[in-house]
Structure formats: C-alpha cells, structure tokens
Amino acid sequence: MRLSIPPFTLAKSVVLILGSVLFFTPAIAGKREAKPASQLATYKLRPMDLVRIQVFQEAELDRELRVSQDHTIVVPLIGVVDVRDLTVRDAEALITELYQRDYLVNPQLNITVTEYSQRNINVLGAVNVPGSILIPPEKNLTLLDAIARSGGFSRLANRNKVSLTRTKPDGQTVNFIINADQLVSGDTNNRSAVQDGDIIFVPERIL
C-alpha cells in the first residue's frame, strides 16, 4: 500500500530539518575555530599586544587594553598592572587576585589576545630568499626554522659558520657562531628559539 503524505506535513518537516541544521552549525563552527588551551597557557604577553578583559556580570569593567612598552596595562579600579613575563592565564590569575583583594567578591574574568604584536627576524647572506621573517603568534622558531622560511641554504652557503646577532634587553649586542650541520645531525646544544630582532647571517663558502 502506498502512503500519501499531505503537502503541508512534508513542507513542515523540511522546515524543521533546515532549522535544526542552521541551529547547530554555528556552534560546531565556533568550536572548530577555538584556539587550543595550551597556546594560551604558554604565550607570554608582549608590548603592543591588544588584550580584551571581560569580567563576568561586571560589564562596566570590560576593556580592550594595549600592553605598553614597559610591559604594563591599566586595569579599571586596580590601575597599573605589570604583566612582564606573564602568560595569558598568569595575567588572568593575577588580575583576579587583585580584584578579589579589594573590589569584587569571587570575580570571574577572561583575557584574550585580540591583536598580537609582530615579531621579526632578519635572515641574510647565502639563503635563497634573504629578508625579514615574521615569527608567528603563539609560536617559536629555531634557527633552522628561520632559514627554512627563507628558502633554505643556497648552494654556496657555509653552513658551519652561521652568525646570529642578538641585542639584549640592556642594549648590549652579542654574537654567536653556530654550526648548522650539527643542528641537523641532532646536536641539541643550539636549538633554542630565535628572538624578536635577531639577525641571522649565512656566509658563503670559499671556493
């Protein structure tokens, strides 16, 4: 026996199905785009980062703040807060403690980085694409990573005497000579991450 479904009932079912799809899709998309918690736990706030502070049920305290060159932000009620060497989660814990100490009962707040400051290094000399390299937000690059992003060593590169020049916080300049072949072969002594402002120079071999 063949069942007959009234047109009105069929149309209603289609609307319900489409409505369910539209209702659940944003939630799925939002979850997919969320940043891993591990990134927020390890990223340290830097000058010129733009951060958003949101305090639960205290909308008048919500702010977008730029981290100053001396690693501070000015938080409502609290005033100047030093976030030097603090991760996003560390900063949350500190500001929560400061609010709880004098102003709010059991405050709950969330800090997100809405705009990251740019970190650049220069890779020069015998590489295939010399120039400035941007260090991705929330990530670190090793010397070999930086050279790879510059197109790799050229065929004339002297890989045994790669120079890395770094300016320390006190303004003093230091220079390191690194054997890149040892890094490739597994030597872990020189695998520390490059830093903002570093200059890597790869000399040419003497033929």
Image (spheres, rainbow, N blue to C red):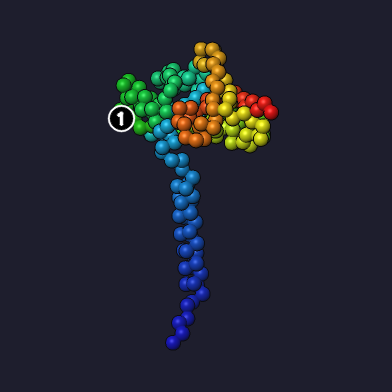
Q: Quadrant of residue 92?
A: top left
Q: Quadrant of the N terminus?
A: bottom left
Which element is circle 1 on? loop
Residue displayed at 64% across by 31% down: 157
Please state which of residues 105 and 163 is positioned toward the viewer in this rendering: 163
Mark 1 closeness class: few <14, some 14–19, many ≥20 residues within 10 Å: few
Instruction: Tell me the residue that label 1 is attached to.
Output: 106
Q: In the rendered image of this protein, does residue 24 appear above or below residue 189?
A: below
Residue displayed at 55% across by 34% down: 145
Residue type highlighted by circle 1: Asn
Q: Quadrant of the C terminus?
A: top right
Q: What percent of the width, then of the height, locates residue 181? A: 54, 32
Q: Could you tell me if residue 134 is visible in this image?
A: no
Q: What percent of the width, then of the height, locates residue 86? A: 42, 25
Q: What percent of the width, then of the height, locates residue 168? A: 52, 16
Q: In the rendered image of this protein, does residue 133 appear above or below residue 166?
A: below
Q: In the rendered image of this protein, does residue 96 appear above or below residue 26?
A: above
Q: Could you tell me if residue 102 is visible in this image?
A: yes
